[in-house]
Image: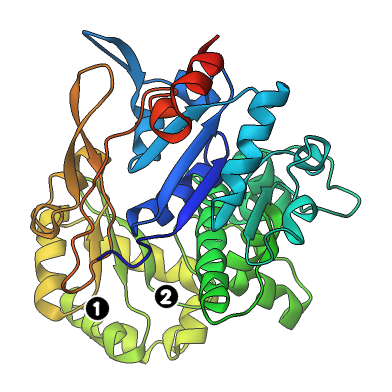
Amino acid sequence: MLPLSGVRVVEFCQVLAGPYCGMLLADMGAEVIKVEPPEGDMMRQWPPITMGSDGGFSENFASINRNKRSVVLDLKNPAHKAAARQLVLSADVVLENNRPGVMDRLGLGYESFRTEKPGLVYCSISAFGQSGPRSTEGGFDVTVQAMSGIMSVTGEPDGAPVKCGVPVSDTGTGLYAAFTIVSLLRRVAGGGPGAHIDASMLGCSLGMAALQTSEYFGTGRDPKKLGSAHPRNAPYQAFKANDGHFVIAAGNDRLWQSVTEVVGRPDLLADARFKTTQLRAANQVALKDLLEVEFAKAGVDHWLAVFEKAGVPHGRINSYSQILADPQVAHMGWIEEMELPSGVKTRTFGNPVKISGTNLAKRRDPPALGADGEAVFGLALSRKAAE
C-alpha cells in the first residue's frame, strides 16, 4: 500500500513545476490524471525526441510524467468543460499552473468548487502568485532565477550572470507544492476543510534562499557571487589539482587541521588569517592560493584518496554520465527501465527516496497523449476529444 493510494489528483499543467509536483504525488501512489489540450503539454515537443516504431517521444516529457494517465480535453468546448468539472468533483486534489485567472474564466477555479466540494485541495502554481502587482505576469525558470536573486549569487565573482544549471525554481516550487498538498490532505482526512494553495515560483525560490536572505537581513549587504566557495566556511569549494578540479568541504576546526596535515602545511594552523572558521572564510582567496600550490603537486585521484583516508568530506566534479555510472547509484536502484509510447526502451531516474517495506518503483510508463480518455471518460467523450 503506497502512502497516497486512493487519492485522485487532476493535473491541468504543462512544462515543469506543476508536472513535477504531480509526478511526486503519483510516485507516492496517487492516481494522477493529466488533462491536456488537444495539442498536448508543450513539453512533449522538447528534445531529445527518441524515434521508435510508433513515432517520436520526448524523453524530457517522459522524465517528469511517469505514473500518470493522460486525457485530452478542449476546455473551450462546453461538453469537455463539463467533463472536466465532473472529473474535479471526483478528485481529492486539483493541480494547475495556468496564469492566475484562467481557471476562473473557464469556470473551473477554486471558488466554483468550494461549496460543492469543501474538502477539495486545490493547488495553483504560478510565477508570482495569484494576487499582487506581478500576478498577471508570466515566467519561466530562468526569469524567476534572475528576479529572485539566485543568479546574483551564482557564478564566478567577475563573470557574467549565469543561472543554476538545474531548474531549481521550477523543481523547488514543485516540491513546496507537493509538501503543502500532502499536509492539507492530512487535515482533510481528519475532518478539516480543503483549501486553495497559492504556490509561486518567486516565493519558493526566495524560501529556498534562507541563508542568502538572512545574510542580507543580518548585515544589510547583498550576498555576492563566490563561484564554488562559501560565504561562511573555508576551505569549502573547488580546488585545482595538476589534472583537474575537485571539491573539499572542511567546515570546522577539526577538519581544517586534517587538511593541513594532508597537504603537509602545519604552519597554516598558526597563521592568524586562518585561526577560526570566520577568519578562514574572510581570507579564503589567500587560503585557496596557498592550498593550490600544494594541490598542483598531484592529481585529482591522489587528493580524493588522501582526503578520504583523513575523513575530510570531498567530491569529484562529475558529469552526469559519470555520476549515473557510480556504484552508489546502482546500489540504490535509482535508475529504472522505461518504455516510451513510441516503443523505445530507455532509462529514467526514479524516485530517490526509500520507505521501508514500500516499493516506490515506477508503476506506469509515461502516457501517450490522450491514452486514457476511454478509461477515464468512456468511449464517446474520448472520441470527441480526439476530433
Q: Which residue is mark 1?
A: 259
Q: Residue at x 58, y 71 (%)?
A: 184
Q: Nearer the viewer, residue 60 or 100?
A: 100
Q: Which residue is mark 2?
A: 234
Q: Check the image and report above or below for 181 versus 366.
A: below
Can you give x and y, in whole percent of width and height, for residue 353 in the image?
28, 64
What amino acid is labelled 1 in the image?
Val
Can you give x and y, in whole percent of width and height, for residue 369 in the image?
43, 22
Q: Check the image and report above or below for 368 versus 272.
A: above
Q: Which image quadrant is residue 346 in?
A: top left
Between the residue at mark 2 and the residue at mark 1, the CA separation in whole angstroms equals: 11 Å
What amino acid is labelled 2 in the image?
Ala
- Residue 160 visible, this angle: no
Q: Residue at x 15, y 54 (%)?
A: 329
Q: Which image quadrant is residue 5 in?
A: bottom left
- Residue 373 visible, this angle: yes
Q: Check the image and report above or below for 113 versus 386.
A: below
Secondary structure at numbered mark 2: loop
Can you give x and y, in whole percent of width and height, for residue 307 in the image?
16, 72
Q: Residue at x 55, y 63 (%)?
A: 176
Residue 220 located left or right of residue 347: right
Can you give x and y, in whole percent of width and height, for residue 297 in the image?
17, 57
Which corner quadrant holds the C terminus?
top right
Mark 2 surroundings within 10 Å by alpha-carbon count, few (fewer than 14), some (14 through 19), many (20 or more): many
Disc tally is: 2
Q: Which image quadrant is residue 80 in?
A: top right
Which corner quadrant holds the N terminus?
bottom left
Mark 1 surroundings within 10 Å by alpha-carbon count, few (fewer than 14), some (14 through 19), many (20 or more): many
Q: Residue at x 78, y 39 (%)?
A: 107
